[in-house]
Image (cartoon, coloured by chain):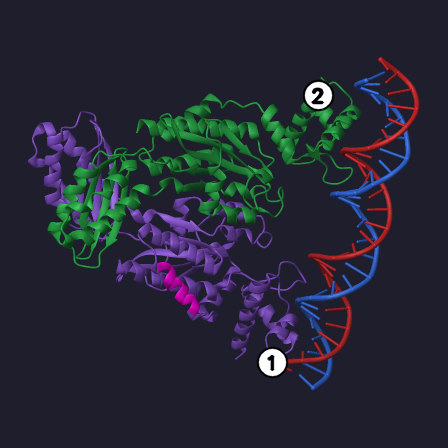
Chain colours: A green, B purple, C red, D blue
Amino acid sequence: MLEDRRLAVLRAIVEDYVSTHEPVGSKALVERHHLGVSPATIRNDMAALEEEGYIAQPHTSAGRVPTDLGYRLFVDRLAGVKPLSSPERRAIAEFLDSSVDLDDVMVRTVRLLAQITRQVALVQYPSRSRSTVRHIELIALSTTRLIMVLITDGGRVEQRTIECANPISEVALGDIRARLLVAVSGQPFTSIPEILTSFSGQFPAEMLQLVTIIQATLLDAVTERIDERVVLGGTAHLARYGEAFPLSIQPVLEALEEQVVLLRLLGESSANTAVTVRIGHENPIEGMASTSVVTARYGIGDSATASLGVVGPTHMDYAGNIAAVQAVAQYVGRILDEQ
Amino acid sequence: MLEDRRLAVLRAIVEDYVSTHEPVGSKALVERHHLGVSPATIRNDMAALEEEGYIAQPHTSAGRVPTDLGYRLFVDRLAGVKPLSSPERRAIAEFLDSSVDLDDVMVRTVRLLAQITRQVALVQYPSRSRSTVRHIELIALSTTRLIMVLITDGGRVEQRTIECANPISEVALGDIRARLLVAVSGQPFTSIPEILTSFSGQFPAEMLQLVTIIQATLLDAVTERIDERVVLGGTAHLARYGEAFPLSIQPVLEALEEQVVLLRLLGESSANTAVTVRIGHENPIEGMASTSVVTARYGIGDSATASLGVVGPTHMDYAGNIAAVQAVAQYVGRILDEQ
DNA sequence: ATTAGCACTCACATGTCCGGAGTGCTAGAT
DNA sequence: ATCTAGCACTCCGGACATGTGAGTGCTAAT
């Protein structure tokens, strides 16, 4: 029960600090939350919490502020998940339902997430490791350039232009196209590399150069990780914390411009379906020690394939953001499933 | 000659203010620039300049700061174009040469521009009004869904998925595909709408529904303005002006998230090849009254087709930015020409 | 026209002071 | 054993006074 109250105090501190952004003192605490005890008692609890590293004071005789560790405890044991209001859920569904293709879904999702959480939002493209080849097309653009277009069963399209040292024979190209089509059509991306190993054998020597480069390009296309793309939105929300977290918005903005960083922010979230929260220094990016990241995986069908999430100051509304990220992840999965 | 000195004073004020971001006074002025006169004389000139609205003082007994009008005069008559250093030019060329496709060129360009100007950079996709159809493909993905892929002579690829109310007949689809290919192959985008008007006549009634929707989709694809896409980069540079232009970075960030706004920023730049500068309130976007925009058109071949530019505070290095924008526009045009 | 000189005006930094919020500690109440 | 009341202490931050310096406009002399 003593433990219970301490946790209640921590929760109260986090909640107050998140809403006011100001260090919170014992007196204000008993007033705003109906803990049935006096400020002095709270002070003892606070001293204990500080001892254990959950809270800290910016300077002597100031109120307390949660530490990263405090937030951690808060999200692990105290933060309920605020269920979204049903109009909110409806808005999400409507907004995403009207999207026309994958790119559109990504863009809409990132906007949506940024809007409802009022934070910076990140959405990673879903991996297409389970895609299969629906069609492949080779078309000459000029005597030395051709374009390869790859269409997957999911309706995604990959393109590659190929530059050739020697002039391309239309006949040879048609031949290669036809055989390639037979060889890879209906095959999953994952088995293409193996199929290709024996492919060039069937061609005469004078076509080999062309075949080889096409083969290499196709291999590149099917092994490329589309899921290394991340869409970003809502950076304007960063500016809201002008003073609140000091001066640090430039490094954060800089970090957010690097795809690699975005991937790291999203990437290492847990494999299972739950929401992952990384608080302050817990996240691996330099210069983002005062931000927290809330991510969830979303999947097409039952296989979890990519992540999305939000980035904000450590003093964010964890309950709300967790709920939003979770809900959006669910809906996006569902939408992509339908397509 | 009196006029001459006044202009020299204005130039000096702009230059000093741009480099220090602090109001500049008469004494500092004669020290840093070797105008051969005394501070008092300068003060008279400054009073005149203020009278005419080119400079202003933030408060009595402070130094002077250029007004938007002052900057305008400066860029119109005083700012020489700083030629880029030859290593800089080489870097631009190398960086852009290694790009593989249009998307890549756009992304690299925006990075490059942001990096050398240290401002926020914008690049608009080039219009493809002069594109012609190289190939068109229709492929069924399921019984009710199909995908249309359009390949242009420039090697660009457009895709559209089409949802159909009734099951699609493979035979009918193949028929449509073949005839469509004949009809539009090699035709410029601009003449497609006309070609399509008489296209559906050749099909029997039971195929009409399918033909109609395909036709509509194709029409949509060729008339869609790809040049309504704008790539953005270097937003982190905004944060550098933390205090310098006060509080206003949030509205700017917000504005920059709207594609429409970006288009307006770029769009109304003059049709000719020169660089356009829009200063402070001159630019049409609310909340960007304290920013200036430097844009240039770049063209594939001789037809000017799209814009790129940078956005920064009104107290930017106009000479440098103009030079950079101009140089990058030239190089991008050249690169796109080669492809 | 230009300049030197001068009085004047503010912004700003510095210093001092004080109130208030918050704390820790101790002694007494439950 | 736990809570609470009271108290002395700390220190931030706002209010006020003050001095300094950068900058100005004006006038009179060159």
In the foreground, B51 or B69: B69
Q: Which residue matches tag 2?
A: A3
Q: Which residue matches tag 1?
A: B36
Q: Amino acid at mark 1?
A: Gly
Mark 2 and mark 1 residues within 8 Å of each other at the beta carbon = no
In the rendered view, tell whether residue A77 sits above or below residue B116.
Answer: above
Residue B271 visible in rendering: no
In the rendered view, tell whether residue A147 sits above or below residue A300.
Answer: below
Residue mark closest to the camera, 2 vs 1: 2
* Residue A156: % across, % down: 28, 37
Q: Residues within 10 Å of mark 1 (few under 14, many from 20)?
A: few
For residue D11, which quarter of the picture?
A: top right
Q: Is residue B237 magenta?
A: no
Residue A70 visible in rendering: yes
Q: Which residues are magenta?
A: B87-96
Q: Residues within 10 Å of mark 2 (few under 14, many from 20)?
A: few
* Horizontal side of residue B90 vs A207, given as left or right: right
